[in-house]
Amino acid sequence: MGAVGQELSKGNAAGVFGGVLSDLESCDVWLANLECPLIEEASPAVKCGPVLGAPQGVLQGLKSARVGLLGLANNHIMDHGARGLNTTLAACRRFGIPTVGAGANRDEAGRLWVSELNGMRLGVMALAEAEFSLAGRNSPGANSMDFVRTAASLKQARSACDFLVVLVHGGNEHLQIPRPGLRSFCHWLVDEGARVVVCQHSHCVGTYEKHGAGLVVYGQGNFVFPHRTQRPGWREGILVRLNVESARDWTYEFVPFAMHASDTGIDHLDTHAARGFLDAFTRRSRIFEDEEAYERAWAEFCMERRWSYMTLVSGFRRPLPRLNRKGALTRLLCSRTQRRAMGAMFRCESHREVVITLADLDLAAEREPGC
């Protein structure tokens, strides 16, 4: 984490969080997604995509900023295998920082975090899409978005807490709207008792909508994620601030911020920039008022990425399958990394939905006259 990691390890919360620190410290409890394991030494997992890790000392800065809870259900928490998860959990216990969303097995990973605050029982659930990080029956990892297990957790939450927040680590990177399946899943979470659902993982501030008695935020952007990239929106994020009196009496507000150009921390946007940012956020979110426009936007996203996805799913045409009966062509033309990427694509809900949408669009095109 470079300079940010060094400053956090010194306990310099003010230097990293800037003016945002006052927002954090004014809360009864604030929570964040920890997007990497905290390690003593590297033990990188075999996977496709980047392998992330940070020194355990960064917790000193988070502790100084009075963090109340860290969500561990994400696609990077197992980047250094079981050892990395174990050192993360041990470090959090040592610093007295609770965690949710990961554990030694799927039962531990699925446990709710519940705390009484001002007479209210606040509950937090953390879920992750299926990539390389999910816990199994007897193996460590992150809590999954499995419907059956999530339904059981929601039933427990209805009796265990008064106000439930769900962190969902899922969606398509750099897309400001949710894939249709993710949107339906988040609606279901609210229908089953969640009051606030916040999706992370897209690395950009997305959209939001009110659904039933709840609020769904599709993309919170990055918090402190130093990375040299020209991706639009990478350096911006929002705090989702909740003012809760009861399960029925609560309000929310969005607080925008941005990373410094030097990648050394974050700070509030100035008044003019914040107003423009929030206006754009609201305008963008009106897409849900027009279902056809929303469906078109999703289809356009899929079509823009069709060749990168179809390259991975393209099969061999005759007579190549016969020549490939023992896998010689696969080994020649598809590296281990490519084969892992293909597995990740079919395993992960967001990638899989892109492929299914592309197949549907292709089929629809064939049915058009003249095609």
Image (tube, rainbow, N blue to C red):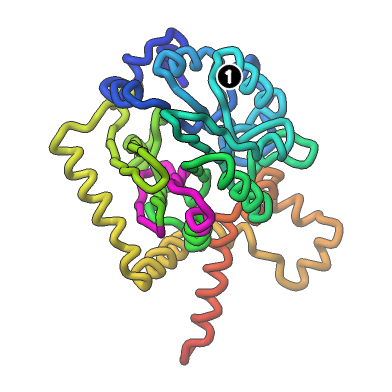
- Amino acid, disc 1: Cys
Residue 341 visible? The answer is no
Q: How many marks?
A: 1
Query: Does 208 appear above or below 112?
Result: below
Q: Residue at x 42, y 45 (%)?
A: 247
Could you say where residue 254 lies in the image, as x and y percent from the top left? 29, 40
Could you say where residue 181 lies in the image, as x and y percent from the top left? 52, 61
Q: Quadrant of residue 226?
A: top left
User: Is residue 333 rendered to the left or right of residue 360?
Assistant: right
The residue at the far right in this view is 326
Does dot 1 land on a helix, a strand or a loop? helix
Q: Quadrant of residue 284?
A: bottom left
Nearest to the observer: residue 269 or residue 247: 247
Q: Which residue is mark 1?
A: 92
Q: Which residues are magenta?
A: 188-212
Q: Residue at x 33, y 37 (%)?
A: 243
Could you say where residue 14 lies in the image, as x and y percent from the top left? 32, 15
The residue at the far top in this view is 10
User: Residue 165: within the magenta?
Assistant: no
User: Is residue 11 rendered to the left or right of residue 73?
Assistant: left
User: Residue 197: within the magenta?
Assistant: yes
Nearest to the observer: residue 87 or residue 146: 146
